[in-house]
Amino acid sequence: MTRKKPIELPEVNFSEDGEIRYLHLGTEWIQGSMFLDRPYDIELEYVQRMFAWLLFLPPVEVKGAHAMQLGLGAGTITKFCHKKLKMACTAVELNPGVLHACRGWFRLPPDDERLRVVLADASLEIQKDEWRGTVDALQVDLYDEEAAAPVLDTPDFYRHCRELLTQQGCMTVNLFGRSSSYAESVEKICAAFGEDAVWVFKPTREGNAIVLAQRTASRPSRDALEQTAIAIEEKWGLPAPKWLKVFKPLTH
């Protein structure tokens, strides 16, 4: 019996440019960022859009709800969910070096009664019974050091993601990369969630296209979405009203 070769994980390092610190995995590709003077705010536009699930969860229900992140990056999403939204947070990260960097360089708080970081392969971790049906907001941002394509992007993976969600839960996923196929990824998400449950953003200038999928498809009215977006901006400072200009259901 041959032993499996251990996974070689990339080195983790950071750079700074003025007021912003960036996380890298041994390449020039940015894996996350942080304002040095505002470590719990969100600097990157696409990361802000990863919170579009707030449009479908009543603001009064956000505090105490369960958010899960697949891929820790610089900890930006996890920090915002924990510090600003006051949610219960679970982050799943493969590379111990990334967790060490988040705690040492990017102000990620230690685990507590509302925050848990699990060092594991996300594709395996999400299949555990303990998580099934418990997640209100699943945020998927899984890239390797080359940022060429999502690391996990199969119909089975997205089906497992759907099984994590509560009935009102949503998944947001970042589709970015030089070798990735946006249309193929969306097709796989639709296969798992159903076309009527999928919403899409136009890509950012940097090429990040955020896709949202609901466990239970719904079509809030434009007025309802606008009112929720205003409440999101007032309560948490995210530019949700601007999202509605570039965010729509996949099918009408």
Image (cartoon, helix red, strand yellow):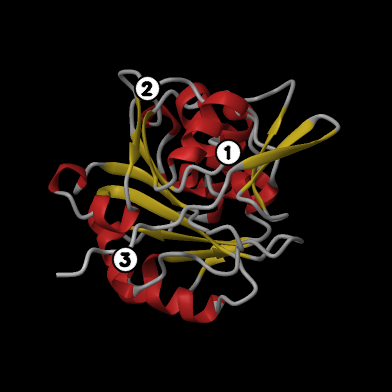
Q: What residue type is labelled 3?
A: Phe
* 3 vs 41, nearest the viewer: 3
Q: On the picture, is 106 further left or further right than 166? A: right
- Separation (CA) of disc 3 from disc 1: 23 Å
Q: Which marked residue is nearer to the observer: mark 3 or mark 2?
A: 2
Q: Position of residue 148 (x, y in %)?
A: 60, 69
Which quadrant of the rendered structure holds the N terminus?
A: bottom left
Query: Could you classify mark 2 by the number of other residues whose Cα lies within 10 Å: few (under 14), some (14-19), or many (20 or more)?
Result: few
Q: Which residue is drawn at 61% across and 37% down?
A: 230
Q: Is label 1 in a helix, a strand or a loop?
A: loop
- Separation (CA) of disc 3 from disc 2: 27 Å
Q: Where is residue 59 in the image (x, y as percent from the top left)?
A: 45, 32
- Residue most extreme to the right: 18
The number of numbered discs placed on residues in the rendered structure image is 3
Q: On the picture, is 25 further left or further right than 17? A: left
The answer to whether one can see residue 195 in this image is no
Looking at the image, residue 160 lies above or below residue 154: above
Q: Residue at x 45, y 64 (%)?
A: 151
- Separation (CA) of disc 1 from disc 2: 16 Å
Q: Is label 3 in a helix, a strand or a loop?
A: helix
Which numbered disc flags the more N-terminal residue, 1 or 2? 1
Residue 74 numbered mark, or none: 1
Q: Is label 2 in a helix, a strand or a loop?
A: loop
Q: Which residue bears the numbered disc 2? A: 111
Q: Where is residue 113 in the image (x, y as percent from the top left)?
A: 30, 18
Q: Which residue is drawn at 65% across and 73% down?
A: 178
Q: Which residue is drawn at 33% across and 65% down?
A: 158
Q: Which residue bears the numbered disc 3? A: 157
Which numbered disc flags the more N-terminal residue, 3 or 2? 2
Looking at the image, residue 242 lies above or below residue 110: below
Looking at the image, residue 232 lies above or below residue 183: above
Q: What residue type is labelled 1?
A: Ala
